[in-house]
Amino acid sequence: MIAKIKADTQGGLIVTTVFFLALHGCSGEQQDSFRQSAAVDDQTVYEWKMITSWPKNLPALGTLPEHFAEIVEKMSNGRMLIRVYGANELVGGLEVFDAVSQGVAEIGHTGAYYWQGKIPAAPFFTTIPFGMTSYEQDAWLRYGGGNELWQELYAPFNLFPVRGGNSGVQMFGWFNKEINSLEDLQGLKMRIPSLGGEVFRRAGGIPETMQVSEVLTALQTGRLDAAEFVSPYNDLAAGYHDVADYYYYPGWHEPGSTLETIFNKEKLDALPSDLREILMAGTEVMNQLLLDLLMAENNKALRTLVEDHDVQLRRLPDDVLLELRRISEEVVAELGQTDEITARIYESWKGFKDGVMDYNHIAEEALIEARKLPSN
């Protein structure tokens, strides 16, 4: 199966490359320790459980943890075996955090923003409305102090969090009516979680948080008027085009959503050091794999939705976007004042975002604008 994963993603070198970086990104002393532990650790086979917030066979989100398990098994030469459970197979999709914290499973694959009710700062480690893109968010986590703050935030829960994929910019979602003005949002029932949901509420809508597996039925029965999920590749597979006519962009609420892989810290710390390194390397593979896969597949899926299923693709009007941005800035600033650690995370996140935005105005954004210039 590893060969198939490599072929499917056209990333045949990624597993080897990330494992190389995991080792060679260490200091000389750490490399020696890693090699020694790999040589002296016994051949105990560890059998772990990984629970997720996604239906198991859902393309990309659902299948990504299976790829992770196969990569880890291959890299560990069969010493680390991970059985993956989809949402509701072992625990509910919104119960992953507590289950891993309590040791029901050793690993979880989910989204930090689902835990905002118990950890106010959690959304900073998934996505913030009108916030950072995938590569900006990754840079903050790895080089801007984000990872250290994330680990501090989760430490009281016996959890060790790392990146587990990124969706890139999402779509706003599926609607059963056109959105021509802010008035059209009034009283609209929409599946939209976390801070995006709070912004939507202040704009006059009614946000709902529910498991992915419940959304299609909710749209069919009228419990929901609209729903956001991810982007065309996942949305096509989920079948939302069968129950909603209008597909809106841009995904202002989730401009670069980081998924999380959470480990029971006590169990992780008890592993031989080489297996810990292999698990970390596997999460790096998973993080890049999702972003690459969605970039490759979203355009094809969007064409299928529009050309084969007559989906009406729509852009939110500028006045709607401007008001949503205004409310978003208000909501995020308020969140940043919640408590001491949330304030520190907010200041770190905002400082990094403001800095990379300055550069991206003359880098990514300038290039995209140049690509759109008409030819003579």
Image: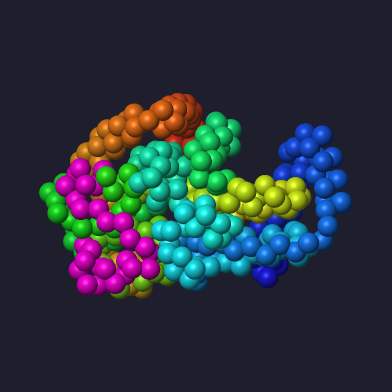
In this view, 28 is above or below 255: above
Query: For this rendering, which residue is in front, 119 or 203?
Result: 119
| Quarter that holds the C terminus | top left
Residue 285 x/y as whole percent = 63, 53
Query: For this rendering, which residue is in front, 297 or 167?
Result: 167
Residue 98 x/y as whole percent = 47, 54
Query: Is 259 placed left or right of 333 in the picture?
Result: right
Residue 249, magenta (yes or no): no
Residue visible at 78% across and 62% down in the picture: 44
Query: Residue 143 appears in which quarter of the rendering?
Result: top right
Residue visible at 55% across and 31% down in the picture: 145
Residue 201 in view: yes
In this view, 236 is above or below 351: below
Residue 12 x/y as whole percent = 70, 59
| Quarter that holds the N terminus | bottom right
Q: Which residues are magenta?
A: 199-225
